[in-house]
Every structure is written in structure tokens, then in C-alpha cells.
Image (tube, rainbow, N blue to C red):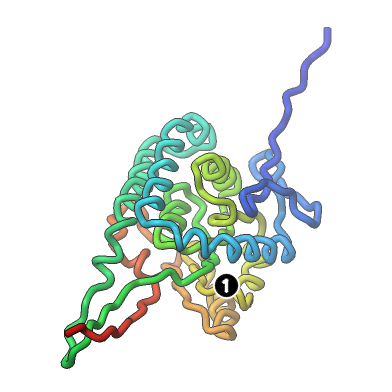
Amino acid sequence: MSVRLSVRKTYKLYIGGKFPRSESGRTFVADGDNVALASRKDARDAVVAARAAQPGWAGATAYNRGQVLYRIAEMVESRRDEFAALGVPAAELDATIDRWVWYAGWSDKIAQVAGGANPVAGPFFNISAPEPTGVVAIVAPATLLGLVSVIAPAIVTGNTTVVLAAGPQIAITLAEILATSDVPGGVVNILTGKYAETAPWLAAHADVNALDLTGVEHAELAAELERAAAGTLKRVLRPDAGRADFTADPGLKPMTALLETKTVWHPKGY
């Protein structure tokens, strides 16, 4: 009697809306699963994809970006069993879905809160408007809620991302949802592997505009990455020593930290 062998899943990278293996061909084992081990070249490819997608994503209406984020929430809700099988608690799944919905609701409101008309002495309109920073490299926490809590505020404000994921199975399962949730390819790119190997290349990359170190748990590595980012004048979001409470109300700071304010003067008509 023959015994059927099940097809084992290999967790690949997520770059430009596709799921390639690492260009190096390397993998590592995480909880019995084969996972792609990202290289420097993979990181560069992810930045290229993020940069190509950024103008179109930033140029989409805020309402449309909110619709896309809400669709992600719908898809996570429909795939709860898969995340539960990966060990994500029900309460964390609830909080993750709610977080996508929360940020979706802010998509067409953050500009009014973070910008506005400024009083000036003279016959001018003076208007400050928030704009996305650009390409954001993120060292993400290992939990699903932590991962979503750093991705969602970056993309809802028009940025694109390159994410180094600590929880590879959870992150790539989320990537499968992003790929079928109307998120344009390249808006979110996810790399799995070793932070210490790929993060320095992203920190020093001249086409990365901001660096989020939320998921970095070692102070020495965080300091090294911040020094590398200084060479290209990146905006750096410093880590909270790995102790961030993602169940708390995130407030507006995760969104406003990745926005640039553009101020325009315009003469008044007579």
C-alpha cells in the first residue's frame, strides 16, 4: 500500500507583488518549515520595486487607499484559521483586523488633522499639506499585530515599504493576503532572514527615505543601523527596546512620523 507524502510549503519572499525565492538560492528552517533567506541583492530588488510603486500609490486618492486597507481586513477575517494554525491567538487576530480597519478610516482624514491653513500677515493663502516620505525600510516585530502596526501607518499615508520580517510564516501568510487584496505590487515588500545581514544595506541605501527600527531588540544593532542611515540623511524611527505595547491605542504618531509637510504660498485674488 502506497503512502502519500504531503506537499510541504516553502515560504518565499514577497517582492513587487510576486513570490520569488532568494536570488542566492539559500533557505533556512523555521519551526520545521523551509523559509527563503534574503540576500543583499533581494533587498536591492525590493527597494527598486518599492520605488517604482511609490508615485502611483501616493497619487491614489486617500479614499481608495482606505478601501484597499479595509479589503485587507476582510481577507484577514476570512483566513483566521490559517493564522490560528501558526499560533496567533484569537484576541491578537481580532486586534489585527481592527487595526487595519482603524487605519483605513484615517486614510482620508489624516491630511486635515496634520495639515491646514496658516494665518499670515499679507494678501496670501498659506497652506501646509502632509505628503508621504517615500520608501520606508522597516525592521518589523515578530507578532502579527506588531507587523501590521508598522506596515499599516506607513502605507495608508502613501509610502511604500520594504519589511524585514522576524516571524517569517506569519509575514508571508500576510503577504498572500496583500497579493489578493488590491494592494499594488511593490507597495509592500517582505524579506525573511537575518536582520544583521540585510538591514545594514537598507539603512545605507540611498533610495530609502526612512528607517523604522521598531522590531530591533538589540541596542548595538539599532545604533549601527542609525549610524548607517545618517549617511543619507534618512528619517529614523527608533525602537522601544522591543517592548512596544501594540495592543494600546497607536495614536497619530506612527502616521505623522512618516509624513513630510509641504507649505505653499498663494496670492489672494482681488
Q: Which residue is mark 1?
A: 208
Any part of residue 243 in sight? no
Residue reaching furthest to the right = 1
Q: Is residue 41 left or right of residue 102?
A: right
Q: Residue at x 59, y 45 (%)?
A: 172
Q: Is residue 237 visible?
A: yes
Q: Residue at x 38, y 46 (%)?
A: 67
Question: Is residue 132 rendered to the left or right of residue 221?
Answer: left
**Relative depth, front residue between 68 and 251:** 68
The residue at the far top in this view is 1
Residue located 69% across and 35% down the image: 9
Give x and y (percent) for residue 100. 38, 47
Q: Can you say which quadrant of the picture contains the N terminus? A: top right
Q: Amino acid at mark 1?
A: Val
Residue located at (54% from left, 55% from top): 188
Number of other residues with Cα within 10 Å of mark 1, as a class: few under 14, some 14 to 19, many 20 or more:
many
Q: Quick check: 261 left or right of 224?
A: left
Q: Nearer the viewer, residue 218 or 140?
A: 140
Percent of width and height locating residue 124:
22, 86
Q: Position of residue 86 (x, y in %)?
A: 54, 37
